[in-house]
Image (cartoon, coloured by chain):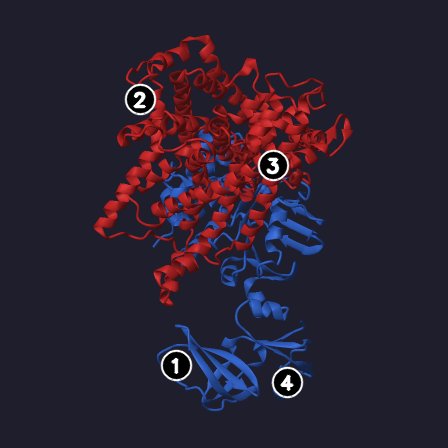
Chain colours: A red, B blue
Amino acid sequence: MGRFQRVFRFFMATIGVMALIWFLVGYILYPALRTVMVSMTDHGAFSLAHYVHQFTSQYTLVALKNSLVLGGMTVVVCGVIGTVLAFFVHYVECPYKDGVDKLLLLPVMLPGIIIVFSFVQLYGESGLVTKSLEWLLGLDGAPYDFSGLAGILFVHAYTQYVYFYIGVSLAIGQIDASVVESARNMGASQVKVFTSVIWPFITPSLITAGAITFMSGIGSFTAPMIIGHGYKVLTTQILLSKANNFMGVAATQGVILSLISLVVFGLFRRSEVKRRFQASVKGVPFSPIKIEHPGLKAAMRLVFGLLLFTVLLPVLTLFLLSFVKSSAWMVSIYPKEFTWDNYLAIFTKRRTFAPFLNSILLSLVAAFGCLVVAVPSSYIVEKTKMRVKRVVEALVMLPWAMPASAIAINMINAYNVPTLFSFNTVLVGSGILLPLGYMIRSLPIMMKTTQISFQHVSDTLLEASQSLGASPVQTFGRVILPMVSPGILAGFLLVFVRSVGEYTISAFLYTASNKPVSIAMVNGIFEYNIGLAMAYGALLVILTLSFTLLIRRLTAKGSEGGLMV
Amino acid sequence: MQSAFEVAHLAAGGPLFFGYCGREREKMGSLVLRDVAKYFDGVAACSEINLTIAEGEFFTFLGPSGCGKTTLLRLIAGFIRPDKGSIYLGGRAITHLAAERREVGMVFQNYALFPFLTVFENIAYGLKIQKKSKAEIRRAVGMYMEMMGLDGFEMRRISQLSGGEQQRVALARSLATEPKVLLLDEPLSNLDARLRDTMRMEIHSLQKRLGITTLFVTHDQTEALALSDRVALFERGCCEQVGTPQEIYSQPDSAFVARFIGDTNLFAARISEGRATLSGGLIFRLGSSKRKGCFVSIRPQDISLSMIPPSGPNIFCGTLKESQLNGMWVTHSIEVAGHIFRAVVLNTRTGSLKMCPGASVFLSIPEASITVLMR
C-alpha cells in the first residue's frame, strides 16, 4: 500500500509538473520565439530584411531614438523626484509621515489610462489648470504645450517616481545609525557623512529603481498613444504596424524593444550587484533628523501640502468630472452642471455596462490563471529540489523583461495559426487571448508574491508538523495553506487590480465581444462623452484602491506570521 | 522558589502524568542505531554509528558544531534517510518509515511553533492529527499546559510569548502526542543564561518524572554533564566516546574528549615503563598504570600548589606567570621547563594562595590523576 501510494504520488507529481512546463513553454517561450521567427521571415523564407529595413528606415530610427530618450529622461526626472521625496519623508522628521507615505504610493496603484485622462483634463489644451492659468494671466493661448515628449514625461514623472521613492525609502530605513555616528566621531562633517556613508547605502536601490523605471519608460504605451501626438515611440509604432497588418514589421519592432529592455536591465543589474553590500552585524536603525527651525518647519509643511495636493489632484478631478453632464460642458471653462447620469448609464444600459463587467470577468480569469500557474511554480522553486525548478523560474519570470506591447505581439504571432498548445485552434479573434495576455503580463509579479509567501514557511515548521504525525497532505492543508493563503490572495487581488484598468495589451488583443473598460474609456473620450469615461475611471479607482487596501492588510498579516518563524 | 512543574505537580496531587505513567510499557522506546551512516556530497556527516539507548534514558549527543550530531537526530526523526545502517525503535525497524509514522517527538532549536495558531491550537495540533475527540484533546492539552505552567495562555498568539514560554509550548506540543522518544535539538541555545539554567532543571525533572526516552543534542558540555544519564561525544561525524558524564570526564578516551569536556593540561609525551617524558626533559611518574599512548592529560583541579616543597611523586618547581580570578576559583598559569600548567584553586578567604607573577611555586600532581591517551 505504502509503495503503491508512493508510486502513485510520484506519477501524479510528474504529470502535474509536465503540464505546468507545457503551459509555460506554450504560452511564454513559444510566443516569444515565434515572434523572433516571424521577424526573421520574409515571404516565407529566412531573411533579415525586416531588421535591415528597420535600421535604415527613418521612421523606425526616430521612434527608436525617441524611445531611448524617453526612457533615459524618465529615469532622470523620476530619479530626482522620487529620491527627493524619499529624503523629505524618511530622512528628516516629516509631519504625518505614515499618511504622506501611503499617499505618495497612490499613483502606482491607479491604472495608467486613468492618470493620462485626468492629466489631459487638467493640463491639456483645454484642461482646467491650463484654462485657469490662461484666464489668470490673460493669455490668448495655452501657456505650455501638453503633448509630445514634455507631456509624456510629465505623466511619467507622476506615475513612475514611485519606484525610486520606494527603493530609496527602504534604503534609508536600512542605514545603520551607528555607522553614521562612527563617521561623525572620526570628524566627518554632515556633508561628508552624506557623501561617504548615506550615499553608498542608497546607491544600489537607485540603480535598481533606475533599471525598472527605464524598462517601464521605454515600454510605456498609454501616454505616448494618447498625448504623444507627433512624438512616435517604438510601442506605438508596433500597434501601428499591427493595425496595418505588417506583422513581420511589428514582430521586428517587438524584438528590438525587448532586446533593449533586456540589455539595459542586465547592465543596471550588473552594476547594482557590484555595489551591493551586506552589513556584517545588525545595525542600529536610523532615526530621522529633527528640524527645529520654525521657519523651515513651516516651509516644509507648505511644500508637503502642495505636493499632496498635486498627487491627489488627478484623482479629485476624475471624481469631479465623473459627475459632469458632457453635453453641457462644451462651452464653458469649468463644468457647471453635475448629474448622476453617467453612473446611471453604466449600471442601467447594457451597452455601457458591458465593458465594466467584461473587465471584471477578464481580470478574474487572468488572476485565476496566475493563481493556477504561479502557486505550483513557486512551490516547486521554493520548497522542492526538483531539477526543473530553475527552468520553471526562468520561464515564469521571462515576461517581466518584456514590455506589454511585446507580450501582446508575441501572443498574436503564436496564435494566429492553430498550434498544439492551443489544441489546434486559432486563438486570435477569440475571447480568451485577452485574459491570457493579462495573465502572462502579471505572472511574474504573482510569482514573486507567492514565492515570498512560501519563503516564510520555514522547513522546520513542516518538519515539526511531520514529527507530530501529519502526512504531507495534512501538512499542506494545516500548515502551508494557512501560512501562504494571505500572500496568495494578495497576489490574486494584485493581478486583478493590474488587469482591470489595463490598456496596452487590451489595445492589441481586445475583440468586439470582450471590449474592456479601458478601451471604452478611450472611446468615450474620443466621442466627447467625457463624463461617462470619467465615471468608468472613478469606478476603476474605487475598485483598485479598495482592493489595494485589502492587499496591504493581507500582506501585513502575512509578513507578521513570516517574521515570527 | 518552586519550578512550574513542581507547582503543577503539587496542585494535581499525584497521578498527574497519567499520559506516560499510566501507559503500557511496550509503548516506551529503546532506540538502537546499527552502522548508521549519512553522506552529503560524498562527505560523511556521520559514519559507523552504533548506539543503544535504553528505555527512559536521558542520552545526549555532544560535540562542536558540524560534528554530525544534528544530522543523527534528524535521521532518527526521519527527516533524512541514512545511506547505510538501520534504526530500531522499541524493537521495530524504522529506518525507512516516514517521519510522521515514527512516534518520535521533536523540539526544534527555534521551536518551530505555528505562528498562525494559538498556544492551545499548537499543543492540540498532533492530537487533532491523531483524530482524538474534542473532549480528549481539551483534557490532554489542559494537562500539558498545566504541567508546563502555561495556564491562562490558551488563547495567546505565539508572537505574544517570551522565549521561555515558547520553549514550554514546544515541549508541551511534542509531549502531547505521547511519543516513544523525545528529541531535543539544542532547545536551550536561544534562551538567555539565567533562563537556560532554569529550563535545564525543568527539563531534567520533567524527563525523570515522565520516564520518556530522551535524546538531547547540544554543543554545551555543562548542559550535557548536568542533564544526561549517558553522553555520546561526536567529532567529524564519528562517535568518539560513550559513557556516563563522570566516565567521560574522568576517563577520556582521546585528547579531543579531554579537551572538549572540561579544562585540561594536555601534553604530548613519550610513555615507557610507567613514566611519561615531555619535551624539555620533564618526567611524570604514572604509578602502576600500564596504559600506552602519546598524550597525558591532567585536570587543573588535580594540581596542588604550595609555596614550600611538598613530599610525594611528581613534584615540580615552576614560575607563576599569571593569575586570573573567576569568582569562585582562581586559575594560575605556571611555567615548568617550558610548559605552561594551569591549576585552579578555590578562592576561599583563608586558603587561597597569595602570589605575585614571577614567584616560585611548587606543583604536586598525584599519579592517579594523570590520564594517558592514545590519540
Q: Report crowding for label 4: few under 14, some 14 to 19, many 20 or more residues within 10 A (C-alpha).
A: few
Q: Do the residues marked 4 and 3 share a common chain?
A: no
Q: Do the residues marked 2 and 1 share a common chain?
A: no
Foreground residue among A241 and B243: A241
**Which amino acid, mark 3?**
Leu
**Which amino acid, mark 2?**
Ile
Residue that carries the numbered disc 4 in the rendered image: B279
User: What is the C-alpha distance between the residues marked 4 and 3?
Assistant: 85 Å
Q: Residue at x 69, y 17 (%)?
A: A425
| Image position of B271 with respect to B374: above or below | below
| SS category of the residue bearing label 4 | helix
Q: Nearer the viewer, mark 2 or mark 1?
A: 2
Q: Do the residues marked 4 and 1 share a common chain?
A: yes
Q: Position of residue A157 (x, y in %)?
A: 43, 38
User: What is the C-alpha distance between the residues marked 2 and 1?
Assistant: 103 Å
| SS category of the residue bearing label 3 | helix
Q: Quadrant of the C terminus of chain B?
A: bottom right
Which circle's residue, 4 or 1, is located before the other in the chain? 4
Q: Report crowding for label 2: few under 14, some 14 to 19, many 20 or more residues within 10 A (C-alpha).
A: some
Residue that carries the numbered disc 3 in the rendered image: A61
Q: Position of residue B124 (x, y in %)?
A: 47, 35
Determine whether label 3 and label 1 are within 8 Å by CB.
Answer: no
Which circle's residue, 2 or 3, is located before the other in the chain? 3
Residue that carries the numbered disc 2 in the rendered image: A333
Residue A259 occupies quadrant: top right
Pointer 1 chain: B
User: What is the C-alpha distance between the residues marked 3 and 1?
Assistant: 96 Å
Q: Is residue B235 left or right of residue A209?
A: right
Q: Is residue A416 left or right of residue B173?
A: right
| SS category of the residue bearing label 1 | loop
Residue A312's label in the rendered image is none
Foreground residue among A138 and A263: A138
